[in-house]
Image: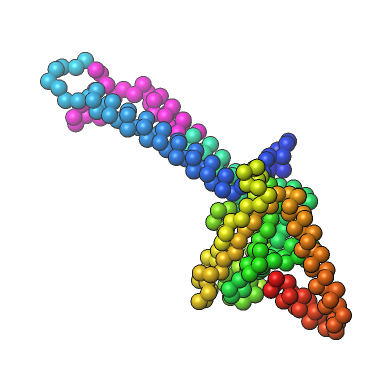
Amino acid sequence: MNTIFSAFPTPIPLQTRAEVFEQIFTIFLGLGTLVGIIVVSYTLYNAYKYRDSDAPTDDDELPTLGELPTGGKGGKKLFVSFGMSAIIVLGLVLWTYTWLIYVETGPEEPGEDALEVDVEGQAFSWSFEYENGVETSSNGEGLVVPEDTAIWVNVTSIDVWHAFGIPDQRVKADAIPGETDVTWFATEPLDESDGERVVNEDGIECFELCGPGHSGMTSNVTVMEEEAFEEWMAEQEAAMEDNSSGDNETDDGNGENATKVRGVTLNV
Ligand SMILES: [Cu+2]
């Protein structure tokens, strides 16, 4: 995918959506607090400086009741403070939108490293199909993905409207019959304390009220070490081949076989 990030001389490291939003939140919270402290302190300082007292004052800039304030050095102070505010605000807008575009368009597709998964919602389960045809479902292992990878999901539904979401990953996509909603998330590298896999139980939820089983329409997300993931995938591929070779014997060539394979795999 061509994004504005393609223009960068070196590829930027893969950032998760959660990291991006946390970064934006931290910057805004920090700057908001700083500006708040400056404004409140300056106000208190002036309230104290110009407090009512009986003593005469020689301050020319002291505003008097019923007269427009003069001074301000020809508006220089106003110009500088407006200019600085504009630079800060425009900078923040640009910076924030750059990151929001990153979230919207995804990281530059890292070629073969990115994983693509077709997600299908149905009342009341999720099924996941990998590019090699391997399938898992919320009744089985759920969504299994490798660490430190961009995962692209193509979300759809085969019955009613659902919505696919992984709150921890700040991911949400509509699952609507006949439509495919494409979105992405990135997994973080696992560290030693994580072991070879981290399971986010019920990490996937349905976010569209879809029927009586809606609240149970959840699925696990398992993030695996690169090698463990490859092993797991090889096992799934082998199991899939076993299944399909068994089915081929009874293949009557009218396309029903595909449904059957799918049915078998879904019930794993
Ligand atoms: Cu639902």
Q: Is residue 105 visible?
A: no
Vertical placement of residue 260 versus 81, above or below: below
Q: Position of residue 158 (x, y in %)?
A: 65, 75
Residue that extends furthest to the left in the rendered view of this protein: 54
Vertical placement of residue 135 versus 101, above or below: below
- Tell me which segment is drawn in magenta: 59-87
Quarter of the image where one finds residue 11: top right
Vertical placement of residue 86 versus 143, above or below: above
Q: Position of residue 49 (x, y in %)?
A: 24, 23
Q: Residue at x 16, y 25 (%)?
A: 52
Magenta span contains residue 80? yes
Q: Please give left or right for residue 63 compared with residue 107 in the image.
A: left
Q: Nearer the viewer, residue 52 or 214?
A: 214
Q: Position of residue 127 (x, y in %)?
A: 66, 68
Q: Residue at x 49, y 38 (%)?
A: 27
Q: Nearer the viewer, residue 114 or 215?
A: 215
Q: Residue at x 84, y 76 (%)?
A: 246
Vertical placement of residue 94 versus 218, above or below: above
Q: Please give left or right for residue 247 compared with residue 194 in the image.
A: right
Quarter of the image where one finds residue 5: top right
Q: Please give left or right for residue 68 compared with residue 129 in the image.
A: left
Q: Quadrant of the C terminus?
A: bottom right
Magenta span contains residue 8? no
Q: Position of residue 12 (x, y in %)?
A: 68, 39
